[in-house]
Image: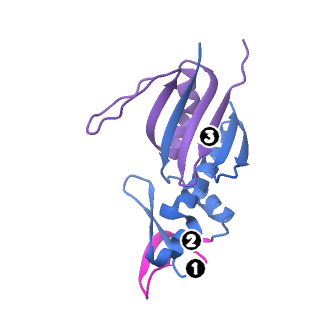
Chain colours: A blue, B purple
Amino acid sequence: MLMSHFTTIKTQIKDIEALKSACAELNLPVLEKAQARGYYENKTRGDFVIKLKGPYDIAVQKQPDGTFGLTADLWNGHVEQEVGPNYGKLLQLYAVHKAMKEARKKGHLVSRHNKPTGEIKLVIQA
Amino acid sequence: MNTKRTIEIIVSPIGEVSIDAVGFKGADCQKATAFLEEALGVVGNKTKKPEFHQVAQKNHHQTLGG
């Protein structure tokens, strides 16, 4: 009998190159070992910093478990405006670029479809 | 029998990923998507179709078999 199975995953950032691809799609530069701007002279050092167009940036810090955490000054919704609530847009594009990269590494064909609902669908021929 | 085997991934605007493997036989299914699950993050829940439900319990360690 043929089965299909369905898995839901909460995205974790583990691959800085895929994160850079996601930022490139949003036209956001990524700097290495830089200062992230926060409210009123507050600055945070990040292993990487995503430079936003607004007044604040996102600091990307390597965690002990090897994943990368995102930190930003969320005051006044400046950051949310650019990358969505809880960095959602950034996480979405990261997952898309990471999945495409890994599938291609295995030699699979991948197609990407941006849906009007805001979801992004990938179809992998396995 | 020759079915088209595809993996469909839907990524929501908040960064949640759903992976659906279609046309695989039994354990091949798990094998086909494992690399994506490992690459992307933490697996929230797995549902086997047809109709197979799992209740996630807090403070209860589960090992997911194939």
Q: Nearer the viewer, residue A34 or A3?
A: A3
- Residue depicted at 50% across the width and 54% down the height: A13
Describe residue A99's horizontal placement relative to residue B44 as left or right. right
Residue denoted by label 3: B9
| Residue A107 sits above or below residue A56 on the image | above
Q: Which residue is mark 2?
A: A81
Identify the subunit bearing mark 2: A
Provide residue B10's location: percent of width, then percent of height: 61, 43
Q: Are marks 1 and 2 in contact (CB under 8 Å)?
A: yes
What is the secondary structure assignment of the residue under circle 2? helix
* Other-residue count near label 1 (Cα within 10 Å), few / some / many at <14 / 14–19 / ≥20: few
- The secondary structure type at the circle numbered 1 is loop
Say which of B42 and A77 sits in front: A77
Residue B48: give x, y in percent of width and height: 50, 25
* Quarter that holds the C terminus of chain A: top right
Give the spatial CA distance, label 2 vs label 3.
26 Å
Select label 2 or label 3 by which is in front.
Answer: 2
The residue that disc 1 covers is A54
For mark 3, give the secondary structure: strand
* Magenta region, residue range: A29-53
